[in-house]
Amino acid sequence: MTESWLTVYRLQACPYCERVIRVLDELELPYHSRFVEPMHSERNVVKRLTGSRSVPALVDDRNDVILTESENIVNYLRGVYGDGN
Amino acid sequence: MAIDFEVTDLGAADHPTVGEPAPAFTRPLVTAEYWEDTALSALEPPVVLVFAPMLGSFPATYIYDELADRAWDDQYDVSVVGCTISTPYDIARFLDAEDYPYPLFSDPANGVAERYGVVHDLDGMAGVSEPRPAVFVIDDDRSIQYAWAATEWPAFPPYDAIADALASR
């Protein structure tokens, strides 16, 4: 519900998603948290945005960036919003 | 031959009435694609907030069918939203399977119904509480413009009266 330029698509109980959430919290970044369904075939919103159905996915409206893979997302967040930025 | 139809008397609901502020809440708002914590105040007013029994029950089916058929959002420029104790997963499947056009708030603990004074403790389903059917039209200033809550079970919203309330805005 938070007003933010960041949106995370996540799956309940998915450790890779939680990893992204932990980094967002650590960097004190507000974000929209959107849960999708476990069935890959039901994740059309993620497919439309990222071209794949994997989560987590991050949308950064401020920088016009869309990312998948928790490693990529975490590196991006730390690089752009971490200390010294 | 007329058949006696036994309805259960629920008594009067103690819900907010016309002119009173609509109780605020935040719950996961479920669309066919995802769910996200959303405040009632984030919806574009006016809002038609519809409390219905859990998905799968026949009253829920009838109520949602009627709402979809009436398409009040086209005619009156309102946001139509439901509130149910069904889980986000149930709701997402329902929206997808039925191609139902409006989002639903998921409120398994029934706290929103409690706030709106429309709790219905279900007989024969121990520990399960859901909203009684109820409809609130919430105005631009977040006050109640129209309110209806079932006083018997089963009961269905007075759709024409709600449409009149929307038309009179």
Image (tube, coloured by chain):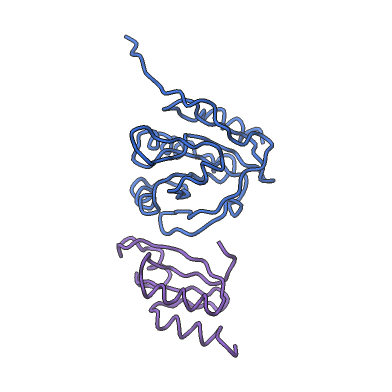
Q: Is residue B41 above or below residue B16?
A: below
Residue A20 appears left or right of B38? left
Q: Residue at x 35, y 61 (%)?
A: A37
Question: Could you say which is closer to the camera, residue B42 or residue B23?
Answer: B23
Residue A56 screen position, x and y as percent = 40, 73
> Residue B39's quadrant in the figure?
bottom right
Q: Colour of chain A?
A: purple
Count of numbered labels shown in the rendering? 0
Camera sees residue A70: yes
Q: In this view, does B62 lie above or below B95?
A: above
Please give the letter of the chain rendered in blue. B
Residue B31 appears left or right of B90? right
Question: Could you say which is closer to the camera, residue B116 or residue B137?
Answer: B116
Q: Residue at x 48, y 54 (%)?
A: B29
Quadrant containing the C terminus of chain B in the rendered view: top right
Residue at the far top: name it. B1
Residue at the far front: name it. B126
Residue B3 screen position, x and y as percent = 33, 13
Quadrant containing the N terminus of chain B in the rendered view: top left
Q: Which residue is drawn at 50% across and 26% down?
A: B151
Q: Residue at x 42, y 77 (%)?
A: A19
Residue at the far bottom: name it. A84
Residue B14 screen position, x and y as percent = 58, 33
Question: Could you say which is closer to the camera, residue A12 or residue A49?
Answer: A12
